[in-house]
């Protein structure tokens, strides 16, 4: 795999914590900074695909085809309205890939292998972001095996830290088997409400127990972030001046800073 391309999985087995929102908007912010980004939608719900404006009828070839080995690995690459941001979209059939792959001997390394093919074919990408489903299933394991690092979105609410131990256990297992060098890129606090004591408490706890693993940037709760997908665009284009846009630009700057 070209070592200039950074492959980052967005993972947390909890749903609704901001994985997809972060995948779309971090992707768009990295593209705005001049990086070439490929987003892989690994969630059968296909929210990242919809949020970037890909109608179901436009999804010619998908993550399902990528994993099942149908056609060339780069067949699934679709352009988006955002310059510098491409996507391999998902449809609901991806949920059966989980079952179909079970019988394969190399079942956790399929995405890794296909992505290697893809990046040999398409050398232009600086980042591949993988939007994982809300489960520690075979799809998420494939993402972790293919990735160099993981970004964990953590919702700023009570019990947020409790789910982390299960995730950390899975990361350790992947490190012990198929991907020794897997790193945590960072943990990003999402839906942060600075007027809420609970948000502040979660942040303090996270910084105390996880230290530098927690990104300095926190993503505020911002209604523009939840509206943007229904307009089929990243928040950066939907409302360039809002707090959500600023936060994701800051997060991208931090990720870029960690490149070196
Ligand atoms: P996940 O992919 O982890 O399931 P999503 O990114 O889809 O989570 O977010 C869940 C819901 O919360 C979505 O409706 C999304 O628009 C909304 N949301 C995510 N982040 C924020 C935020 N920072 N402020 C407001 N709403 C948000
Ligand atoms: Mg999602």
Image (cartoon, rainbow, N blue to C red):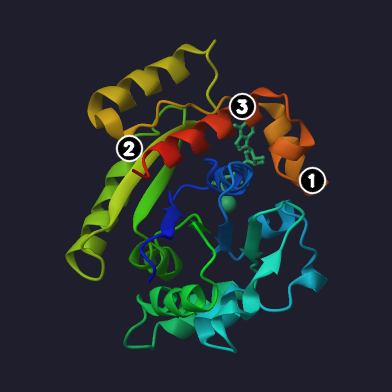
Q: Is mark 1 within 8 Å of ligand 1?
A: no
Q: Is residue 214 left or right of residue 59?
A: left
SS state under label 3: helix
Q: Quadrant of residue 3?
A: bottom left
Respond yes or no on whether mark 3 lies under 8 Å from ligand 1.
no
Distance in Å between CA atoms under marks 3 and 1: 20 Å
- Which residue is depicted at the point 43% across and 51% down? 11
Q: Earlier in the sequence, mark 2 or mark 3?
A: 2
Is the Cβ of the residue at disc 1 closer than 8 Å to that at disc 2?
A: no
Mark 1 or mark 2, which has the lower sequence index? Answer: 2
Q: Residue 32: tell me if it is visible.
A: yes
> Residue 160 at what x, y percent from top left?
40, 34
State how far apart marks 1 and 2 are (Cα).
31 Å
Left or right, residue 205 beside residue 128: left
Per the image, the residue denoted by label 2 is: 162
In this picture, is 191 found above or below 126?
A: above
Looking at the rendered structure, which numbered label has been put on residue 230?
1
The answer to whether residue 131 is visible is no
Q: Residue at x 76, y 46 (%)?
A: 233
Disc 1 element = helix
Badge 2: how crowded within 10 Å, few (<14), some, or many (20+)?
Answer: few
Q: Is residue 243 left or right of residue 203?
A: right
Callout 2 secondary element: loop
Q: Earlier in the sequence, mark 3 or mark 1?
A: 1
Label for residue 246?
A: 3
């Amino acid at each position: 795999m070209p070592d200039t391309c950074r492959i980052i999985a967005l993972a947390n087995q909890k749903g609704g914590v901001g994985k997809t929102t972060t995948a779309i908007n971090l992707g768009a912010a990295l593209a705005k900074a001049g990086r070439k980004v490929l987003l892989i939608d690994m969630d059968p719900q296909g929210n990242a695909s919809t949020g970037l404006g890909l109608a179901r009828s436009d999804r010619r070839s998908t993550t399902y085809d990528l994993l099942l080995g149908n056609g060339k690995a780069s067949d699934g690459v679709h352009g988006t309205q955002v310059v510098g941001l491409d996507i391999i979209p998902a449809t609901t059939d991806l949920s059966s890939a989980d079952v179909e792959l079970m019988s394969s001997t190399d079942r956790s390394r399929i995405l890794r292998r296909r992505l290697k093919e893809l990046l040999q074919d398409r050398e232009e990408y600086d980042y591949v972001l993988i939007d994982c489903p809300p489960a520690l299933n075979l799809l998420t394991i494939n993402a972790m095996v293919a990735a160099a690092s993981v970004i964990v979105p953590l919702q700023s609410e009570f019990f947020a830290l409790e789910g982390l131990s299960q995730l950390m256990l899975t990361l350790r297992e992947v490190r012990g088997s198929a991907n020794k060098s897997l790193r945590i890129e960072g943990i990003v606090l999402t839906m942060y409400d600075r007027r809420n004591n609970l948000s502040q408490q979660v942040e303090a706890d996270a910084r105390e127990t996880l230290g530098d693993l927690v990104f300095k940037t926190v993503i505020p709760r911002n209604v523009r972030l939840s509206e943007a997908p229904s307009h089929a665009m990243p928040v950066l284009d939907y409302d360039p001046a809002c707090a959500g846009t600023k936060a994701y630009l800051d997060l991208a700057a931090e990720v870029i800073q960690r490149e070196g």
